[in-house]
Amino acid sequence: MTAADTQVVLDKLQSNIDQLELTNKGALTALEFRLDAILQANLDTFWLLICAILVFLMQAGFMCLESGLSRSKNSINVALKNITDFGIAVVVFWAFGFALMYGTSVSGLFGNKFFFFTTKVAGYQTYFVFQAMFVATAATIISGAVAERLKFYSYIIITFLASGFFYPIVGHWSWAFNFENPEEKFGWLGQLGYLDFAGASVVHSVGGWIALSVLLIVGNRTGRFREDDKSKSFQGSNTPIAALGALILWFGWFGFNGGANGAMDLKIPLILINTFLSASFGLIFSSIMGILILKKPEPLFMITGPLAGLVSITASCAYVDPADAILIGSIGGIVSGSTIVLLEKVKIDDVVSAIPVHLACGMWGTIAVALFGNFEMMGVEKTRLEQLFIQLIGIVSIGSFCFFGSYIILKIINSFFPLRVNKIQEELGLNISEHNASTDTHELLEVLTKQAKSEDYSSRAPQDPFTDSGIIGTQYNVLMDKLEQSEKQKNKWKNRVSQEIKLAMNVQKRLMPKRDIKNYPIFGLNIPAREISGDFYDFYLHDDEVYFTLSDVSGKGVNAGMVMAKAITLFKIFAKQKFKPNEILLEMNNDLKETNPIGTFITSIVGRYNVKTDLVEIANAGHQPALLKNGKKFKEFTSSSMPLAVTKHKNESVYQLESFKLDGGRIYCFTDGFSECMDENKQEIGIEGVKDLILKHENSSLKKELENATEEIRLKTLKTGTLEKGIKENNDILDDDLTIIGIGN
């Protein structure tokens, strides 16, 4: 073999070695790529599931926020709605919601695959879990807005519609894609180029639009707005809990926005930075608005501020720089605060400001995508004006579909099945009226009421040896058994009952003070609607001071009279010790809470007047406002606390103490028999009507002034068909007790 031949062999051998090395490198590269893909898929799955858990935590945030901003008598109802809507939303979404949202598209309008979701593909399962959290969020937005007046079953219907129909359809329009090729959009809005990264409109405005339609159907809470364009704010049950709810929502929002990315990649840090920056600046600017409008750091503006910023950034959190996120969140805080004021002006009663936060800021956030979004990051080849037009199309189409669709459906349902509770149930509170939390006293009263209406005395009261009402019920049943034995025995017991009532009346009359007191510019008047009044007033005199109280016990009759006697006694004890009015209310409340029948409460005003200094101190526990009249002008001293005997309190600060001088004016305290009197149009005269009545009958004599005003109200409220001369007072039946006191020369 020549040298040339040897060289050829060596070149072939080297070529084979190089080819082998290249093949091995290719195999290793392919293996590394495969391992990287598997690892990335696992990380993406893990990230999405963690985010789903964070979004689930938002449900607890909503529950705290909404129950904290609702009144105590409705807080349990709101909390239970938040639990219930999550379960219903997930089940409905599993059955057909996911199919409508992500199934094979029908003309870009809705899907028709994945009904009763059972796929075993891990990627599909993960995405279902995450989206199920989203649908629950959209549904629960509604509960807070319409709290304190909506039937529990009505809310179930609304949750079913929101989670099973409106949200999936809108979600399909905007987000539906081919799971095999995620770049391929199914929904008509997605194909158009509409962008909403994490659901400012798809999730939040959907809940906001439906909430608005429900509010317009069921109306405002009783007493929230008045005909004189004045609003009455209702104190939530627990503002710190509401604030905690806002913080939990803030925390969960990192999963809300971060999970919408669908993958754990380098976009996540930017998304999270934008999320908490927007929330923070939303808080700042919303708080500033509260200070400018109400001259103080208003809790509602502060609590809703970060949520406004969070909703505002939701649509664009992956498409904007942090500086833009700051601007978006700041504007969101202003939009939310402005909408809160607007709703007050147009008299729409949104308990938790869900419409300002989720609807108004949801729309603003959707628009912000076109105004601030980085088009390269969005993969958009349009002008900002073109993208803005597309975003507006999305807002209008989603709003029209959700608002008008839900309004029409629910309006029809409401005509057959009223969505709202009745007035009595609302006043009682949805905790009791909606969840069968009845009391033994209530059951006893139901039996007595039924007997009174039907005159059928065969029914018997509930018996329980361990409760006061149960013991009364037992004795009442013994009484009824004996009454049925013979007519003679029946008459005997009737007479005994009559004597007991007379005794109670005499006791009550003895407990009532003299109508006027020499040397003190004070006068009181009480006209009971029945034999025994649930209203009462009392005075307690010191050398230079006179303590006074006016209260209204829930219910009437002997039970109300017994509670009244206990309350008067407590007032006298603490007035004698010269407690401050708010301290007296605290002591009365805690004692009555322990001894009163469950469900019985007392609205009360306690005050004291110093004759020498002309100083009046007054505290109000859930009662009608006290009125201070100077000339023709009135000042109202309203209550910011709940009535007595509802819940125990630790200190007197729960009852606000007001101090002022009469300066030649007069102060009036009265029960709801005055303000709820009907005028000639069958409308309650309200507080403004009471003011007019006082001005009409104003007199140099306080006694004469109150007597004339009370007589006019008495004549208006008589239940007799026609009023004739000579009608006896004991034949007059009033709608309610009439009680009023006045202080001033």
Image: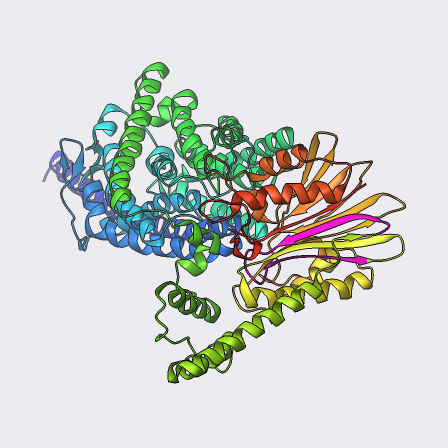
Quarter where residue 578 is shown: bottom right
Q: Nearer the viewer, residue 84 or 90?
A: 84
* Residue that protrudes farthest toward the left in the picture: 1
Badge count: 0
Q: Position of residue 168 (x, y in %)?
A: 25, 41
Name which quarter of the figure residue 88 lies in: bottom left
Q: What colour scheme does the image use?
A: rainbow
Q: Residue 507 vs residue 450: left or right?
A: right
- The picture places residue 187, in percent across and down from the top left corner, at 21, 32
Find residue 597 and report its horizontal and vertical position in percent.
55, 69
Residue at 55% across, 31% down: 228
Image: magenta residue range: 518-540
* Towards the viewer: 709 or 133: 709
Q: Is residue 406 left or right of residue 325?
A: left
Nearer-the-camera pick, 515 or 362: 515
**In this view, which residue lies farthest toward the front?**
726
Residue drawn at point x = 29 percent, y = 28 percent: 400
Residue 147 is at least partly visible in this image: yes
> Which quadrant of the rendered structure holds the C terminus?
top right
Question: Where's the N terminus, which quadrant?
Answer: top left
Q: Is residue 172 above or below residue 433?
A: above
| Residue 301 percent coordinates (x, y) | 57, 37
Q: Magenta segment: does it hold 528?
A: yes
Q: Label the magenta part by its dominant secondary structure.
A: strand
Instruction: Indicate whether 428 appears above or below 350.
Output: below
544 up-or-down from 708: above or below: below
Q: Is residue 594 visible?
A: no
**Residue drawn 58% across the image and 36% down it:** 689
Front position in the image: 311 or 658: 658
